[in-house]
Image: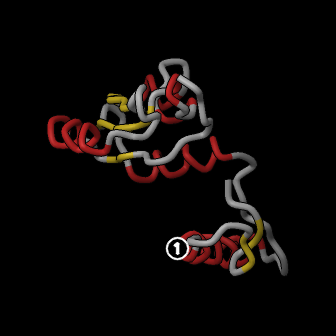
């Protein structure tokens, strides 16, 4: 989840998010004739949903980390919107090294040609 406001984030690497958020703020000010607005998702799930609905069509293929390997519900879990809206291909971590097997992810990506690859995890598990 993005913490903070444009240009003042807790985490680095959010420059493009800052651009999008500033654009949304300016548009909301104009639409609502408001001097101040706050445009932020309430949760990471809402942020993920916004990205998915912007970039994907129902039935598109996504590649995300399996929930049992530390992924998030929105990374393609069957009980989540992502799991029943999109064609989900999952990857995980190597049980011996407990690291993502990027070679295996690459093979899956070449085979399934996902429109979106979700990189990252929510939990660090001991397998």
Label 1: few (<14), some (14–19) or many (≥20) C-alpha neighbours in 10 Å: few
Residue appearing at x 74%, y 68% in the figure: 10
- Position of residue 12 measured from the top left corner of the image (x, y, whole percent): 62, 72
Image quadrant where residue 76 sits: top left
Q: Name the colour scheme.
A: secondary structure
* 42 or 92: nearer the viewer: 92
Q: Is residue 103 left or right of residue 56?
A: left
Q: Is residue 77 left or right of residue 96?
A: right
Q: Residue furthest left?
A: 111
- Position of residue 67 measured from the top left corner of the image (x, y, whole percent): 52, 26
- Position of residue 55 measured from the top left corner of the image (x, y, whole percent): 39, 52
Q: Is residue 11 above or below residue 88?
A: below
Q: Residue furthest front?
A: 96
Image quadrant where residue 59 sits: top left
Q: Which residue is mark 1?
A: 16
Q: Secondary structure at mark 1?
A: helix
Residue appearing at x 62%, y 36% in the figure: 123
Q: Is residue 65 left or right of residue 110?
A: right
Give the tally of numbered discs. Answer: 1
Residue appearing at x 61%, y 74% in the figure: 18
Q: Is residue 35 above or below residue 120?
A: below
* 103 or 30: nearer the viewer: 103
* 104 or 90: nearer the viewer: 104
Image quadrant where residue 13 sits: bottom right
Q: Is residue 46 above or below residue 83?
A: below
Q: Residue furthest right?
A: 35
Residue appearing at x 68%, y 60% in the figure: 2
């Amino acid at each position: 989840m993005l913490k903070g406001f444009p240009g003042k984030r807790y985490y680095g690497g959010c420059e493009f998010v800052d651009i999008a958020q500033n654009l949304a703020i300016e548009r909301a000010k104009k639409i609502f004739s408001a001097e101040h607005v706050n445009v932020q998702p309430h949760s990471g799930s809402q942020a993920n949903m916004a990205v998915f609905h912007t970039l994907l069509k129902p039935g598109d293929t996504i590649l995300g980390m399996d929930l049992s390997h530390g992924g998030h519900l929105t990374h393609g879990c069957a009980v989540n919107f992502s799991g029943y809206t999109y064609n989900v291909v999952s990857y995980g971590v190597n049980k011996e090294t407990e690291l993502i097997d990027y070679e295996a992810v690459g093979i899956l990506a070449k085979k399934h040609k996902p429109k979106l690859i979700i990189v990252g995890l929510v939990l660090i598990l001991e397998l």
